[in-house]
Image: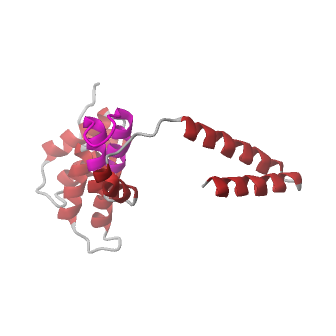
Amino acid sequence: MLLALTATSACTRSNASAGAPHAASQASQQTKASKAQAEQPVPTLAPELAETFAKAQSGDVYAKTRLAEAYEKGEGATKDIHQAVTWFTKAANAMYRLGRIYATGSGVEKDYVEAFSWYKRGARAGNTDAMYSLGEAYEHGTGVREDIQQAVNWYDQATLRGNKAAKAALERLGESFDR
């Protein structure tokens, strides 16, 4: 990696001297970022989590969740709440996106029940878009039996966390949000 960075920096410096001043700025930023990254402590993982880490990096939502739990509890990893939050967020986002894929039928057979299931997981993990999507599912009976009270509940949860679409949905349903 160092070799690649050095080659990139040399190439960028060469471009800068050939009349590309922006490239010199980029080279300086890359060098600063590399130094800052090298100075940060690297959280340690037990060997048995190496495969989980690799799967998490490749997008496996269950591996992301397992890794987040390991960081949160300090089991098999250095206890690091920042890393736990990072991996839980990545997992929640992945869950929401899986729900969207099933809801829209993007590359898979459209399945509203499966979409609902992933939205619920994402919402429980804190993704506000998933909370909003659960509200929509309950409001329209998509993948679940229609339940306006549940719709309002999920819209409310998303609104509490700053989701503007959820706030608009509450207003459309005639619900006031006084928090």
- Please state, as top left, top right, bottom left or bottom right, where the N terminus lies in the image: bottom right
Q: Is residue 69 above or below residue 118?
A: above
Q: Residue at x 28, y 52 (%)?
A: 48
> Can you give x and y, in whole percent of width and height, for residue 155 in the image?
25, 41
State left or right for residue 159 relative to residue 11: left
Which one is nearer the viewer's eye here, 18 or 44? 44
Q: Residue at x 32, y 44 (%)?
A: 88
> Can you give x and y, in whole percent of width and height, for residue 165 in the image?
36, 44
Q: Which residues are magenta?
A: 65-92
> Can you give x and y, in whole percent of width and height, for residue 31 in the image?
68, 43
> Can residue 163 be seen here?
no
Which one is nearer the viewer's eye here, 56 or 119? 56
Which one is nearer the viewer's eye here, 157 or 52? 52
Which one is nearer the viewer's eye here, 37 or 65? 37
Q: Residue at x 30, y 44 (%)?
A: 68
Q: Quadrant of residue 101?
A: bottom left
> Can residue 113 be seen here?
yes
Is residue 18 shown in magenta? Answer: no
The secondary structure that most of the magenta stretch takes on is helix
- Please state, as top left, top right, bottom left or bottom right, where the C terminus lies in the image: top left
Q: Quadrant of residue 178?
A: top left
State left or right for residue 153 relative to residue 47: left
**Which residue is most to the front?**
47
Q: Residue at x 18, y 52 (%)?
A: 138
Q: Is residue 172 above or below residue 48?
A: above
> Can you give x and y, in whole percent of width and height, for residue 90 in the image?
36, 49
Is residue 85 shown in magenta? Answer: yes
